[in-house]
Image: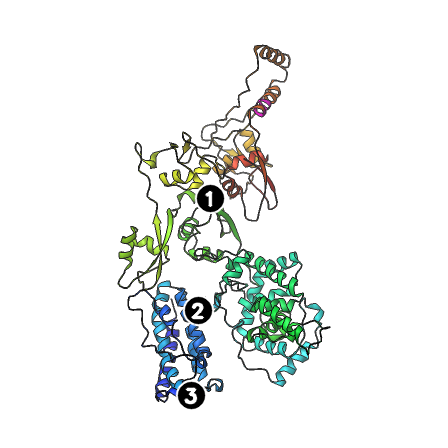
Amino acid sequence: MICLSRHIVVLGTFLSAILLAACAPAQAPVANDVPSGGPVGKPDSLVYSEDGSESFAQVALREKVHDSLAVRPSWTYYQYALEAMDNQEWLLARHYLDESLRQFIAEKHGTLYHNVPESVDSIYRAQMPLRIVDALDEVYPNISEIGVDAGVFEQNEVSIEGVDALDEGAADSAALQVIENFLDTIDVAQFTLPVVFNERVMQEIFYMSGGARSFTEGSLNRKTAYDSLVYSKLDEMGMPRDLIYLALVESGFKLKAYSRAKASGMWQFIPETGKRYGLAVDYWVDMRRNPEMATTAALKYLSRLYNEFNDWLLAMAAYNCGEGRVRRLVKEKMADSTWDTTQVVTYWDLELPKETMRYVPRILAAMVIGHYPEQYDMKINRQYRPDFDTVTVFDSFPLEEVAKVLKVPEDTLRSLNMELVKWCTPPNRDSYLLRLPVGTRSAFVDGYDKMEKNNFSSWHHHKVKRGESLGVISRQYGISVKELQQANDMKGTRIRAGQTLLIPIKVTPKKSTGKKPAKVKTYVAKLGDNVATVARLFGVSQESIRVWNSMKDGHVVNPGDTLFVSKPELKPVVPQASSAPKLGKGERYVVGEGDTYAEIAKKFGVPVVMLLEANGGYSHRLSVGDSLVIPEFTQTVVKNAPKSSEKQAKADKSSSEKSSAKPAKTADKQAGSASAKSEKPAKERVHVVKKGEGLWDISRQYGVTIEDIVRWNNLKDTKIRIGDKLIIRK
């Protein structure tokens, strides 16, 4: 929960601010004192809309102040807080409100903000604390429901010092001399980004190692967890390794960092740019928070910018303020009559926005400090990303369900799957690659069918009206309060007017005659049926129907087809095995030296997959002395193809009698030949195994069985490696 002592400090500061405002002159503004830019804001101890259709934040965001007041940091951060509230980012909103208050108090003593009439300033100073208090009155109850320590949130998710703090005090000549003396001793050739140690870079070194020291040190520590990921991708694309420090300045390597411009992730993509480079952003997922995908996208974007400007510093500037602005300023500089057109325009020649003027030097400063942390007394402790397994899922289910099956905290799953915005795997995707704590993959596969799936056909957005409660809304849509809370990741029942709730719409099963759907093992398809309608009729997933019936993607269900609607028994087809050792009833096989699952399975004439499943082979390495259960298995013998004539049959019989010395070999050959004649030629495709994939993922992806893949590829067991090429037959 939120630290109580911090609440007391914040409230005490508010009271002081209000008292300061009360002591300010209460002179009413005169018409001539009002600068242009709109009326003075009037909070009225802020207000919902009369009909309850709008939230506090929606109303407050329409409030305007004079242009001379709107540039103040206290107002700017207050606006960021309102935007965060409108997005229901309650911890982020509280962070910005704290910052707004801090700036508000500092502005009292800043000469920069004394350029407005005293009467206008007095009204602003009287009203601003009330605005912040009203906003916090909305924020704190929602934070209490979340039950998360805001300090942990700020440490891991909010990154504001990196590029936002632009007004810190400048280094004096003595401080700059100390920095310069050290820089004179190092070789710039070691850096992969072009660097000039001018005053702008040295000022940023002073800031990053002084005022933003905590941010820099924390960022360098977090960086160690992502070094191998980012460096490998930079090397793969032939890009400068020191571009990694752009991510440090952008986010401090906080995967869920969220900026005032609604940028997110390690590389701080705004939604539009993220989508352009393949990072899906919707209600369910935000792939900007996926470190692998976001890094690939960022490097593609930077590479494109470099190809246009042929200068890494200009590329980084364009990454910050947009390529259009940099492109225009370069053209204007080239068109300037005072510019020597034989010279190339560099980053240092342009008058860019204030933030971008400090952004690139700040990256170069971070690069210097990152190469020489000991020079700036930065203590760096190596951090590691947690090891994880991956599994491809085709159904949507709550993370809470997965956590129960794996017996791990739900927060562990959330930290491994940062891109998940809500409480479940995305229901709007055909598949999703879910990360699991290392060593839990087999437990997930074993418990998959037991997990409660989200059996909803669609989703609706409901805007809360004044006087509505969760009970009223749930009855309106025919769902339970618990389902409504789960869909919106709510711990309590408090809602507010103007809030938007996600409403899950349930599937209504078709009425059927005869046996109850839950007990039906097979179903005869009718005209108009498809995989989706059959799945809904029996309350199972479409993927289950495909797997149970060995259907490929796009399979057409024809009237009269008999379909399995519950899990059928495993009946794989394998070649006839030679005589197997006999075990007494209840006896187990004891593993000897050199035994493998594949060899034991062959010895007893059972599929490797069945042997593995019966003995936990997916998670247990075979050791000498282990005792194994040998599962019962009825082999299916493939019949020979019919002969063309009686004459041919006699010839075959005669041939068989003559070669009676090797009956088994001849029979095997004939069976293989017959099988080849009877099987229809199948289309084949090659699947290259990706990181984290297992045969279970691949079999579900193509709608085939694990046994099929093992048989098609003559695998000795179910172990596969990244880069393996597997034949998949359709």
CA neighbours of label 2 inside 10 A, class few (<14), some (14 to 19), many (20+): some
Amino acid type of the residue tagged 1 in the rendering: Val
Q: Identify the image quadrant of residue 333.
A: bottom right
What is the quadrant of the N terminus in the image?
bottom left
The residue that label 1 is drawn on is 445
Q: Is residue 674 magenta?
A: yes
Q: Is residue 35 magenta?
A: no
* Lower sequence index among marks 3 and 2: 3
Residue positioned 50% across, 31% down in the render: 572
Q: Secondary structure at mark 2?
A: helix
> In the image, 686: left or right of 478?
right
Q: Identify the image quadrant of residue 200.
A: bottom right
Q: CA distance from mark 1 to mark 2?
A: 36 Å
Q: Who is closer to the viewer here, 76 or 628?
A: 76
> In the image, 457: left or right of 622?
left
> Quick check: marks 3 and 2 in contact, CB under 8 Å?
no
* Lower sequence index among marks 3 and 1: 3
- Residue 693: x and y in percent read 54, 46
Q: Who is closer to the viewer here, 623 or 415?
A: 415
Q: Who is closer to the viewer here, 372 or 52?
A: 52
- 582 relative to 334, above or below: above
Q: CA distance from mark 3 to mark 2?
A: 39 Å
- Residue 275: x and y in percent read 52, 57
Residue 16 in sight: no
The residue that label 2 is drawn on is 151
The residue that label 3 is drawn on is 117
Q: Which residues are magenta?
A: 671-676
